[in-house]
Image (cartoon, grey):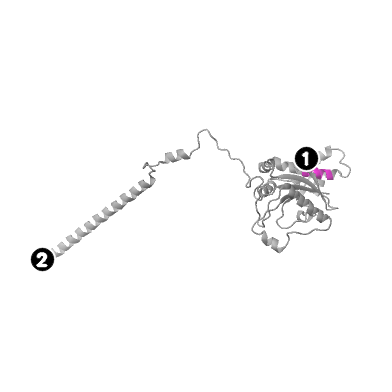
C-alpha cells in the first residue's frame, strides 16, 4: 500500500513539472511573438511613427492625373560622341567613312590593295566585339564582295547582301542593329553592272518561286527608268535601272524605319547610293542626298 502511494506521488510530481514547463514554454513563445510583432510595426512606421499604407505608397508612385508619359526613341550614343570598339577605333563620321571606302576602292582598282585587318592578330583583337565603320547593302552576286572591292578586312564593314540589293524587314532590322547598337554612321546601297536580278525584271514575264518577290521589289525602279526615255550617254536601260533601284532602296530605308530616320534627322547617319563596274572594279557614287 505504501509503495503504491509513493508511485502515485511521483507521477503527480512529474505531471506538475511538465505542466509548469509547458506553461513556461507557452509564455516564452507568446513573449517572442509579441517582440516580433512589435519589431514589424516599428519597421513599417515612418519617421514620425506613422505606419505607411499600401494605398499611400501607390498614390505617391502614380503619375499626376492628366499627364501622359511620352517615351521617344533615344540613340545609345549622344550626337557627336564616339563609342569605342574592341580594337579601340573611334566611330568614323559619315564623310570620313565614305572617304575610307573610296580610298580603299582606288587601291583595289590600281592593283595596290593593302589587304588591311586580315591578320590572325586582327581576328583575335575583335573576337570579343565588333565596331564596323560602314554598312554596305549590296547584291548577293558572287562578283561583288564588299570587303575586297573596298580593300577592307575583319570587323571593318557590316554587310547585308540580297539579290538586287532589295530590302525587307529582316534586312532593315539588321541595318538598324548596326546603326543603333554598333554606332555605324554611313549606309551605302551598292548596285552593280549587269545585275542579274534587275535584268530579269527588265525581261518581264512570271518569275518562279520566291524569285518573284525579288522581281516585284525591283519593278518600280525599272518602270521609273523606262519612263525616263533615253538612258544617257554611257548608261543603257539596265545600268540606269540599277542606279535608280539603289536610290529607291536608300529612300526606302528612311521611309520604312523610324530608327534610321531619326538618326538621319539628327545628322548622325547618312546614306549614299553607288554603282560598281564589274569591268574596271571602280565604285562611283550615284546618290548622295545629304553629303
Please say if 151 is above or below 222. Answer: below
Determine which residue is flagged by label 1. Answer: 220
Residue at 14% x, 65% y: name it.
6
Which is nearer the eye, 133 or 79?
A: 79
Q: Is residue 253 magenta?
A: no
Q: Tell me the residue that label 2 is attached to.
A: 2
Q: Quadrant of residue 204?
A: top right
Is residue 204 in view? no
The one nearer the camera, 42 or 261, is: 42
Q: Position of residue 56 (x, y in %)?
A: 43, 39
Task: Say which of 30 and 110 sits in front.
Answer: 110
Residue 277: % across, % down: 83, 50
In space, the residues marked 1 and 2 are separated at their CA atoms by 121 Å
Give the residue drawn at x 17%, y 61%: 13
Dot 1 or dot 2: first in sequence order is 2
Which residues fall within the magenta stretch? 239-246
> Would residue 240 be counted in the magenta stretch?
yes
In the rendered structure, the answer to whether residue 144 lies left or right of residue 51 reads right
Foreground mark, 1 or 2? 1
Which quadrant is home to the C terminus?
A: top right
Would residue 66 appear left or right of 21 to someone viewing this image? Answer: right
Dot 1: few (<14), some (14–19), or many (≥20) neighbours within 10 Å? some
SS assignment at label 2: helix
Element carrying mark 1: helix
Q: In the rendering, which numbered label is found on residue 202?
A: none
Q: Report if residue 31 is visible in the image.
A: yes
Amino acid at each position: 500500500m505504501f509503495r503504491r502511494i509513493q508511485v502515485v506521488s511521483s507521477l503527480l510530481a512529474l505531471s506538475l513539472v511538465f505542466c509548469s514547463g509547458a506553461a513556461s514554454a507557452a509564455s516564452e513563445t507568446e513573449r517572442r511573438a509579441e517582440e516580433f510583432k512589435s519589431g514589424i510595426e516599428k519597421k513599417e512606421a515612418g519617421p514620425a511613427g506613422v505606419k505607411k499604407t499600401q494605398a499611400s505608397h501607390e498614390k505617391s508612385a502614380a503619375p499626376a492625373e492628366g499627364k501622359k508619359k511620352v517615351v521617344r526613341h533615344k540613340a545609345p550614343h549622344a550626337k557627336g560622341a564616339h563609342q569605342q570598339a574592341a580594337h579601340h577605333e573611334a566611330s568614323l563620321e559619315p564623310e570620313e567613312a565614305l572617304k575610307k571606302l573610296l580610298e580603299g576602292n582606288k587601291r583595289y582598282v590600281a592593283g595596290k590593295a593593302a589587304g588591311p585587318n586580315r591578320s590572325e592578330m586582327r581576328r583575335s583583337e575583335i573576337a570579343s566585339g565588333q565596331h564596323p565603320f560602314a554598312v554596305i547593302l549590296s547584291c548577293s552576286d558572287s562578283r561583288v564582295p564588299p570587303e575586297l572591292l573596298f580593300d577592307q578586312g575583319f570587323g571593318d564593314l557590316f554587310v547585308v547582301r540580297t539579290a538586287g540589293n532589295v530590302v525587307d524587314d529582316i534586312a532593315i532590322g539588321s541595318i538598324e542593329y548596326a546603326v543603333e547598337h554598333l554606332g555605324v554612321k554611313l549606309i551605302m546601297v551598292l548596285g552593280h553592272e549587269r545585275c542579274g536580278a534587275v535584268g530579269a525584271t527588265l525581261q518581264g514575264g512570271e518569275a518562279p518561286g520566291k524569285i518573284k518577290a525579288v522581281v516585284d521589289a525591283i519593278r518600280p525602279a525599272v518602270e521609273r527608268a523606262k519612263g525616263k526615255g533615253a538612258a544617257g550617254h554611257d548608261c543603257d536601260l539596265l545600268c540606269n535601272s540599277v542606279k535608280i533601284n539603289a536610290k529607291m532602296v536608300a529612300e526606302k530605308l528612311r521611309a520604312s524605319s523610324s530608327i534610321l530616320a531619326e538618326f538621319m534627322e539628327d545628322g548622325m547617319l547618312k546614306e549614299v547610293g553607288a554603282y560598281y563596274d564589274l569591268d574596271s572594279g571602280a565604285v562611283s557614287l550615284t546618290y548622295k542626298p545629304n553629303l
